[in-house]
Image: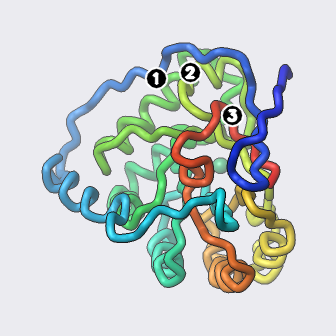
């Protein structure tokens, strides 16, 4: 891969940016969504809290920041996680699977309304590098549609399942592809203490930590993570906030 290093202005954030150009893909078709709150209602409820207007945005050039990311939801444990994050005034990024959005649209609405960032993690979680360009496009666009139906926005970030991507995937994504710098392996080790230990030990300013909120063991690990890192002075921000509002085309933070 042709990878160029770019050191951002944010303290200790090193982002690797692929220099290949992106196509103008990523068109969004809308589909009518039955049995949902009206668009106006969604906009009202979401708009009130989405950017937490009362709070000044965290400046990651001045304070230690970390981006917690939660993949594969939403699911039945997402609301418990939201309560924990709220208790620590933590923002996170959720890379959601389209078919789970369709199953748990309310959980996604509450996630977004609480000020968290939403990213596209495909419709059914395949290895996208094994699919045709048209199938990759469909994986992203179906998910965009489900997210738009639930919260009224098209996500600005993509994370491919398994972190597997190639030129086709990046072109079809048409927006920043977000990887991670700390993998807690929480899907393998269903042990809260172990997951928390791994996250706390590996974190550096600018880290992007990978979790999965579909595992109750992970959700139970998060209070420990937040408590330990708060004590060390970390602030918990969305991926976009970590990069001052505009992430590079490929985020592979090594914080
Ligand atoms: Zn995943």
User: In 3D space, how far apart are the residues under numbered discs 3 and 2 (Cα atoms)?
Assistant: 14 Å
Callout 1: CB less than 8 Å from ligand 1: no
What is the quadrant of the N terminus in the image? top right
Query: In the rendered image of this protein, does residue 103 appear above or below residue 66?
Result: above
Q: Are marks 2 and 1 in contact (CB under 8 Å)?
A: yes
Q: Characterize the local packing of mark 1: few (<14), some (14-19) or many (20 or more) Cα atoms within 10 angstroms.
A: some
User: Is residue 124 at all visible to an observer of this figure?
Assistant: no
Q: Residue at x 76, y 77 (%)?
A: 196
Q: Mark 3 vs mark 2: give the one in front.
A: 3
Question: Where residue 36 sits: x, y (%)?
Answer: 20, 52
Mark 3 sits on what residue?
250
Mark 2 sits on what residue?
172
User: In 3D space, how far apart are the residues under numbered discs 3 and 1 (Cα atoms)?
Assistant: 16 Å
Q: Secondary structure at mark 3?
A: strand
Query: In the rendered image of this protein, does residue 196 appear above or below residue 150?
Result: below
Mark 1 sits on what residue?
26
Figure label count:
3
Q: Characterize the local packing of mark 3: few (<14), some (14-19) or many (20 or more) Cα atoms within 10 angstroms.
A: many
Whether residue 237 sits left or right of residue 100 in the image: it is right
Whether residue 250 sits left or right of residue 183 in the image: it is left
Question: Where residue 207 sits: x, y (%)?
Answer: 74, 58
Which label's residue is closer to the chain start, 3 or 2? 2
Most foreground residue, 64 or 177:
64
Which label's residue is closer to the chain start, 3 or 1? 1
Q: Are marks 3 and 2 in contact (CB under 8 Å)?
A: no
């Amino acid at each position: 891969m042709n990878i160029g290093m770019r050191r951002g202005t944010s303290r200790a954030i090193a982002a690797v940016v692929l220099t290949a150009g992106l196509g103008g893909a990523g068109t969004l078709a809308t589909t009518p969504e039955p049995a949902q709150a009206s668009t106006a209602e969604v906009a009202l409820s979401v708009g009130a809290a989405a950017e937490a207007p009362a709070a000044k945005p965290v400046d990651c050039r001045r304070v230690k920041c970390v981006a917690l990311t939660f993949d594969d939801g939403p699911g039945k444990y997402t609301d418990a996680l939201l309560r924990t994050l709220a208790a620590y005034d933590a923002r996170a990024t959720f890379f959601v699977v389209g078919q789970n959005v369709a199953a748990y649209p309310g959980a996604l609405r509450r996630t977004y309304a609480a000020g968290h960032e939403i990213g596209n993690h495909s419709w059914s979680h395949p290895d996208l590098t094994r699919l045709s360009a048209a199938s990759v496009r469909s994986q992203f666009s179906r998910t965009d549609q489900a997210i738009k139906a639930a919260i009224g926005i098209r996500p600005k970030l993509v994370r491919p399942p398994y972190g597997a991507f190639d030129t086709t995937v990046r072109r079809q994504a048409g927006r920043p592809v977000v990887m991670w710098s700390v993998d807690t392996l929480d899907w393998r080790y269903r042990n809260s203490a172990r997951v928390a230990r791994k996250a706390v030990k590996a974190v550096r300013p600018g880290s992007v930590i990978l979790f999965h909120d579909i595992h109750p063991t992970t959700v139970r690990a998060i209070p420990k993570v937040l408590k330990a890192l708060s004590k060390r002075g970390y602030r918990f921000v969305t991926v976009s906030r970590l990069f001052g509002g505009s992430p590079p085309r490929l985020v592979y933070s090594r914080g």
